[in-house]
Image: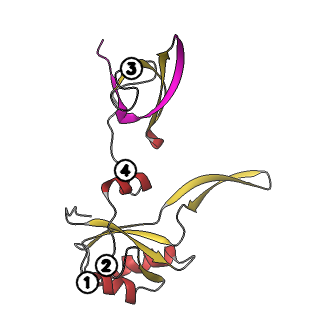
Amino acid sequence: MSENKEAKWYILHTYAGYENIVKANLEQMVENNNLQEQILDIKIPTEQTIEEKNGKKKAVENKTMPCYVFVKLVYSSQLWYMLTYTCRGVTGFVGSGTKPTALTEDEVLQLGVEKREIVVNYAVGDTVRITDGPLTSFTGAVEALDPEKNKVRVAVSMFGRETPVELELDQVEVISQ
């Protein structure tokens, strides 16, 4: 889908259990009405968990925010009307009064709607310097990396002992050898 700088993320409130129906209806609406330039993306917030049933483990996709569908769109009163009155299962936009509230960049990242690509140029065992937060300018060795969760664990020497500290991937930089 094309990128539009005016497009922002909004949240649609749906009836319980209608999230997938609403997403399918929205995708059909975009296709039928040629709205690809106005509605850029539709997401249902989910996470994958492992459930055990009858001794067998199975990966299950669970909704993290039931009754909500995230939509990236270029807002207009015509789109508001189409989405709130003609899309089955939608009860309205999240926001105050009749105008929906767009998510801020921070909210988009915190809710995991969009992932920010972070280039990691260090590995386990590398010595890094902390560049942000209360431990800025401390150095330590990378113990573990978790790109999925945007986390790195660094062993920092504090008060004469090694202390593991969990940070975000972009809060550290490798020290040139």
Q: In the picture shown, does residue 59 fall above or below 153?
A: below
Q: Which residue is mark 4?
A: 115
Q: Quadrant of residue 12?
A: bottom left
Majority secondary structure of magenta residues: strand
Please report whichever mark, 4 or 2, sits nearer to the chain's N-terminal start.
Answer: 2
Cα distance between the residues tagged 4 and 2: 27 Å
Q: Which residue is mark 1?
A: 77
x and y, in percent, of residue 50 in the image: 65, 51
Magenta-tinted stretch? 160-177
x and y, in percent, of residue 162 in the image: 53, 16
Cα distance between the residues tagged 1 and 4: 29 Å
In this picture, residue 66 sits left or right of residue 102:
right
Q: Quadrant of residue 71?
A: bottom left
Question: Viewer-proximal residue, 121 or 104?
Answer: 104
Q: Is residue 136 magenta?
A: no
Quick check: can you spot residue 118?
Answer: yes
The local crowd at label 2, few if under 14, some if 14 to 19, many if 20 or more residues have their Cα within 10 Å, is few
**Could you tell me if the residues under marks 1 and 2 are in contact, i.e. CB atoms within 8 Å?**
no
| Residue type, mark 3 in image | Phe
Q: Which residue is mark 2?
A: 99
Q: Which residue is mark 3?
A: 138
In this picture, residue 145 sits left or right of residue 6:
right
| Residue type, mark 4 in image | Lys
Question: Viewer-proximal residue, 46 or 140?
Answer: 140
